Amino acid sequence: MIKNILEYGDQAVLLDFGDEIKKEINQNVIFVFKKLKQIIEENKIPGIQNIIPSYNKLVIQFDLNLTKLDQIHQLISIVKNEKIEINFKPKKIEIPICYDLEYGIDLERLVQITKLNLEEIVETHLKTNFYVYMLGFMPGFPYMGDLDPKLYSKRLTTPRVEIDEGSVIIVEEFCAIYPYKSPGGWNIIGKTPLRLFNQNHLNPNLINPGDEVSFKKITKNEFLKIWKSNYESQN
Amino acid sequence: MKAKIKFSNPGMLTTIQDYGRNHLQDIGISKGGAALPSLMEIGNELVGNKMQCSFEFIFNGPVVEIIEGEISVAVTGHVNFEILKNHKLEKGICFRSYILKKDDQIIVKNTIDSVYGYITFGGSIQLSGVFDSFSCNPRSKIGPRDGAKIKKDELFDFNVNENQSEYKLTREPDKQFNNKIRLLEGPQFHFFEKKSVQNFFNNPYEITTTTDKMGMRLSGSKIENQLTSNIKSEAIIKGAIQVPADGQPIILLTDHQTIGGYPKIAVVISADFEKLIQIPPKSMITFKKVNYKEAQVSYELNQKTIKNIINSKTKI
């Protein structure tokens, strides 16, 4: 599982699990991520500031005032010998999505690209159980895979200047949702009325690494109703 | 006791900062915080705060008016500023605190040969932290008041510290910067062609004007990649130097994104990070490769120096 351990500056270490993007590799990353968090919490180990999983790497960032590199290596050696058990049940999350052309502004282009009709695109997207590889780029932004190869598309040649929050987007084998308004070059297929990230909530993010996400089709009226209650009534 | 202040001029880009936030990079929020924690710490010390927060400004600073009460204030950095006290204007001195009253003002002109400066008030600011921090990131909208920069005429309330006095330092931080930055090899060091790596260490690079608190874009001899200029995105840390396909390095700074897909040739050692982030655009910098031991020893030495500076605080 851990193929290599590299120093990453003087206050971080990078654990290398491989080069590919594969659910099995990422599950190992998430396993070590959760295990480390558990050990640190149970033993009140000081000085670890962040543990950050990505597709096939895990970065441990520490504070040199409170701990030293040797102690981080010791911590890693504990988890290195752990047998990997993917025994944590993934949290399943259902995200409502409206595929109305007003929101799914790239759907008609995708018909050209994929040679599928609108219903087939929607159906293929709805059929997939997505796995959350990691969060990043902006607060709460989930990188999810793997999209059905029939829906593969490339990034736009010129990224859009602003994309609405809640937009559901795809590129290559990935699907994601914008938590905030942002520029971006992925293809937009619809919009969810849920808020993915709210800094005023105790658990600010809706989706976590390792979760399983599926989509549920809703009408424009349903969309507007949920959107209103999520965005207009609260902070 | 209470005091109220008003930013009658917000400056170019002024934000509230403290040490930032830990344990959130896995959900897309990087640590952030003050660009120069040492200047913020010294400022808080001079006004009698147990480390709280400071107002961080860039290049052209704000004008702050005391609207109500009496409060001590310190400006830290290499800053040109004035103090309006009892209707009299005097030249401001960095690294000392002033007790100001209603109608007095702090008029910050600009930072000198540097980027960031700090204004710190003595007392607890009347705001609620977000994820245990007052730090504001206007781009990701994280922080009190949705992380916004300070707006014109924005008001802040303080519960003022008791028994305020004016302090100065007998030992100040160095003002002279040399532009040599020490680096450790990055995780993808071997991606880069030998000759290019030599060029990287032997030639100066210019800090371009597209630099901000997220990243410092450099311009200089092109770094050729012999493997691939895209990797599977992985966590980014402060000081990492990534090289996109155009071969021009970008150093990730305090408000960096949480993950990135460019290979990283090197990482700036922590001991040199504050020096680096204070160097203004259009300056030239050079790099030197060091080993882990030197990085660690230099960092510990730096921390000791900051402690000594803080301990040199004396009443005026």
Image: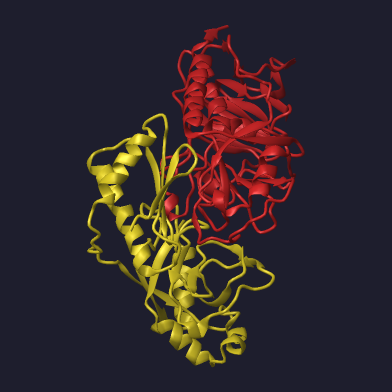
Residue B14: image quadrant is top right
Instruction: Work out which residue is located at the far front of the displayed protein and give it.
Output: B194
Residue A158, percent across and down?
69, 70
Q: Eyeballing the image, is A202 above or below A163?
A: above
Q: Eyeballing the image, is B313 above or below B190?
A: above
Residue B186, percent across and down?
53, 46
**Which residue is found at the position 33% from the left and 58% from the top?**
A1
Q: How many labels does the image show?
A: 0
Chain A on-screen colour? yellow
Residue B91: image quadrant is top right
Q: Eyeballing the image, is B231 above or below B112?
A: below
Q: Is residue B183 left or right of residue A66?
A: right
Residue A204: image quadrant is bottom left
Residue A38, percent across and down?
26, 48
Using the image as rendered, state which of residue B218 and residue B86 is in the foreground. Answer: B218
The colour scheme applied to this rendered structure is: by chain
Using the image as rendered, state which of residue B7 and residue B206 is in the foreground. Answer: B206
Chain B on-screen colour? red
Instruction: Work out which residue is located at the far right of the displayed protein and give it.
Output: B282
> Can residue A207 be seen?
yes
Q: Eyeballing the image, is A160 above or below B261?
A: below
Residue A70, percent across and down?
35, 35
> Can residue A200 be seen?
no
